[in-house]
Image (tube, rainbow, N blue to C red):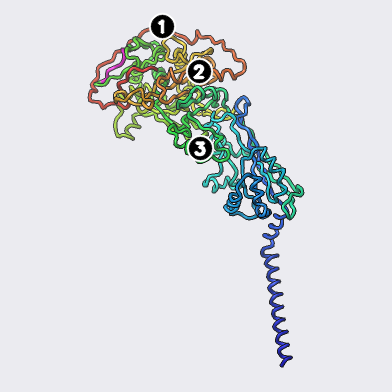
């Protein structure tokens, strides 16, 4: 019996041994075959540390090679939890000047693998980096990360043009174009930084370091250096930009300056602006709330995304159309007595006492509304529409900087389709002087005056210096008509009675003032309240004989174009001309000054339209400066 019990025990033990051997083989099979790759990776991770090396972003220069941004080192301290000795937590707290509980919380909330570095502190000054580095060997798993930080040298100057960086948005994280980009990478989110992000970004590198069981670095195994992003040279001139922005002061508005023979943007301003340095490492909630709660909306690019009645700057369009359609000649005269009557409506001139007898030249120089009412009457709204759109108004310019507003140039068909009403002559009067339904963005007005300055070529605005010009159209106007109008624009700035005298410079400047009404003065509101004041416009080009710059300036609620916008234009023009190589500024002015045209007097016939509805806009225009 005893022998049988012994045999059974041996048998049980044998079975147990067989089962244990089987389980051991099964476990080895699991570890080596099923999970071999994973454990091999973890083993390698214990031996090797792979550190990403960020690529320096390409530098952005102005057209004269002045850097607008720079890259600087950005230091962070990170910890690999698996390599860190938790017994040294309080010493680490002292080293980093951080509460031990905060360090533990950061590691816990990271939720990542214990082999993945967790960033504990960032934005360290170099002195603190040196202090930590000198004691880092006492803390296995602790190391310094160096990234590249973007600095915008001129702060908020040209911020709407240059743009800023930010982390991937949720939508961008799903975009295949960004599949190889780390969630912590800062990419272009606005302006040029966004438009040319793939060019500026560069290619990150990697450093492979061998470490021992304690996480101490032993030697470099491999290094793949980062590839710096490509530098780009913008078309803007930074001194023009800086000085013109300063001239705006605290006022809101926009400026766009173009190179007449290419369409290159020499300056683009939207005020108020923002400091892109706030975004370089992630904007704080406090700073973001301050920006979005600002009633003047500094994130709005007014140069492209706001539209306004162009006011008397639109008379350039009306003059060209009138000459080309031969409803007027340079010799045509009109007697301005402060306004005209049309049915029961009075259409006033900005000069209440009138301008007297004026020709086209004087009408442009002194911005006589009555003269252009009559030109508009002779043309009709559909011809005004034809020439305005031909000059680039009422449509997007094609600039790739960001979304644009279309503006609006109405015609009779537009009104029938949108309002189911006919077009009335009273509406033509105020459209001829840039009021009523007409609306344009500052960049559209810059394109319009740029086209006049170069003699009729419509160019797409471009952002990079020496980009091939992109011709998008040609104005259907003779060189003679364009020259007649340009002579008038020269007179606006340089002749007695000209409304743009504040833009007069040492070089010949041609321009046109404009005052766009915000509300009707008949409504009883105080014109002293800033939000009810007129918008101030000025469009200009210089030098008149061979233009190097054309620009449009808009000052929101600035009042008169001649007083608010023209001085800013002068500063911008002077700064740009200064930036050029020595330029022959001797311009023969005799060829662009002409007076004494024969007189042709227009009478205003009575009409039978007394029951016509009130035209859009303010038909009764009170005295205001241009």
1 part of magenta stretch: no
Q: Does the image show residue 480?
A: no
For the residue pair 473 and 191, the one nearer the viewer reads as: 191
Task: Residue 481: give x, y in percent of width and height.
Answer: 45, 16
Circle 3: element type: helix
Task: Residue 556: give x, y in percent of width and height.
Answer: 42, 26
Identify residue for label 3: 287
Separation of residues labelled 2 and 3 (CA atoms): 34 Å
Q: Judge depth for marks 2 and 3 and give the one in front.
A: 3
- Outermost residue on the right side: it is 219
User: Up-down: is 265 above or below 329?
Assistant: below
Q: Label 1 crowding class (10 Å Cα cut-off): few <14, some 14-19, many 20+?
A: few
- Which quarter of the figure has residue 417? top left
Separation of residues labelled 1 and 2 (CA atoms): 29 Å
Point 70% across, 51% down: residue? 140
Task: Residue 438: give x, y in percent of width and height.
Answer: 38, 27
> Left or right of 531: which side holds 466?
right
Q: Label 2 crowding class (10 Å Cα cut-off): few <14, some 14-19, many 20+?
A: many
For the residue pair 375 and 532, the one nearer the viewer reads as: 532
Point 69% across, 62% down: residue? 36
Q: Quadrant of the C terminus?
A: top left
Separation of residues labelled 3 and 1 (CA atoms): 61 Å
What range of the chain is rendered magenta? 336-342
Identify residue for label 2: 570
Q: Judge depth for marks 3 and 1 and give the one in front.
A: 3
* Most common SS among magenta residues: strand
- Which quarter of the figure has residue 580? top right
Q: Earlier in the sequence, mark 2 or mark 3?
A: 3
Q: Judge depth for marks 1 and 2 and give the one in front.
A: 2
Identify residue for label 1: 596
> Left or right of 153: which side holds 564?
left
Q: Earlier in the sequence, mark 1 or mark 2?
A: 2
């Amino acid at each position: 019996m005893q022998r049988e019990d012994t045999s059974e025990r041996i048998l049980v033990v044998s079975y147990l041994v067989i089962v244990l051997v089987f389980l051991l083989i099964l476990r080895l099979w699991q570890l080596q075959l099923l999970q071999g790759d994973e454990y091999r990776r973890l083993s390698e991770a214990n031996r090797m540390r792979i550190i990403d090396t960020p690529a320096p972003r390409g530098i952005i220069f102005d057209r004269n090679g002045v850097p607008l941004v720079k890259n600087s080192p950005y230091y962070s301290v990170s910890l690999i939890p698996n390599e860190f000795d938790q017994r040294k937590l309080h010493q680490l707290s002292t080293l980093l000047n951080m509460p031990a509980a905060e360090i533990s919380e950061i590691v816990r909330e990271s939720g990542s693998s214990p082999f993945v570095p967790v960033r504990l502190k960032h934005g360290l000054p170099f002195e603190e980096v040196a202090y930590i580095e000198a004691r880092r060997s006492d803390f296995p798993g602790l190391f310094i990360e160096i990234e590249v930080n973007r600095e915008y040298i001129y702060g908020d100057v040209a911020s709407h043009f240059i743009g800023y960086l930010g982390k991937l948005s949720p939508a961008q994280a799903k975009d295949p174009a960004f599949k190889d980009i780390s969630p912590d990478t800062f990419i272009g989110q606005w302006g040029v930084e966004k438009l040319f992000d793939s060019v500026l970004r560069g290619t990150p590198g990697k450093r492979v370091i061998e470490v021992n069981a304690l996480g101490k670095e032993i030697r470099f195994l491999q290094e793949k250096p980062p590839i710096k992003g490509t530098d780009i040279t913008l078309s803007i001139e930074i001194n023009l930009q800086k000085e013109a922005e300063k001239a705006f002061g605290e006022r809101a508005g926009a400026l766009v300056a173009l190179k007449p023979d290419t369409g290159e943007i020499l300056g683009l301003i939207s005020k108020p602006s923002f400091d892109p340095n706030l975004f370089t490492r992630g904007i704080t909630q406090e700073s973001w709330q301050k920006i979005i709660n600002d009633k003047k909306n500094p994130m709005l690019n007014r140069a492209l995304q706001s539209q306004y009645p162009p006011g008397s700057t639109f008379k350039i369009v009306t003059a060209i159309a009138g000459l080309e359609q031969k409803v007027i000649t340079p010799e045509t005269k009109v007697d301005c007595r402060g306004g005209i009557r049309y049915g029961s409506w009075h259409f006033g001139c900005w000069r209440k006492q009138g301008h007297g007898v004026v020709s086209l030249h004087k009408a442009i120089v002194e911005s006589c509304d009555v003269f252009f009412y009559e030109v508009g009457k002779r043309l009709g709204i559909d011809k005004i529409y034809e020439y305005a759109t031909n000059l680039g108004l009422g449509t997007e310019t094609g600039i790739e900087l960001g979304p644009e507003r279309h503006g609006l140039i109405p015609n009779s068909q537009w009104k029938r389709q949108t309002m189911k009403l006919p077009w009335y002559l009273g509406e033509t009067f105020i459209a001829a002087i840039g009021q009523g339904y007409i609306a344009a963005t500052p960049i559209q007005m810059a394109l319009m005056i740029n086209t006049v300055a170069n003699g009729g070529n419509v160019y797409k605005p471009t952002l990079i210096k020496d980009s091939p010009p992109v011709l998008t159209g040609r104005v259907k106007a003779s060189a003679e008509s364009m020259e007649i109008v340009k002579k008038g624009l020269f007179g606006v700035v340089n002749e007695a009675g000209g409304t743009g005298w504040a833009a007069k410079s040492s070089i010949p400047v041609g321009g046109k003032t404009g005052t766009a009404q915000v509300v009707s003065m008949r409504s009883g509101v105080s014109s002293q309240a800033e939000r009810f004041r007129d918008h101030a416009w000025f469009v200009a080009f210089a030098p008149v004989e061979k233009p190097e710059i054309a620009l449009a300036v808009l000052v929101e609620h600035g009042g008169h174009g001649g007083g608010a916008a023209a001085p800013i234009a002068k500063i911008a023009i002077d700064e740009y001309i200064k930036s050029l190589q020595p330029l022959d500024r001797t311009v023969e002015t005799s060829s662009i000054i002409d007076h004494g045209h024969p007189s042709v007097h227009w009478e205003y016939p009575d009409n039978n339209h007394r029951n016509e509805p009130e035209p859009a806009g303010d038909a009764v225009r009170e005295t205001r400066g241009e």
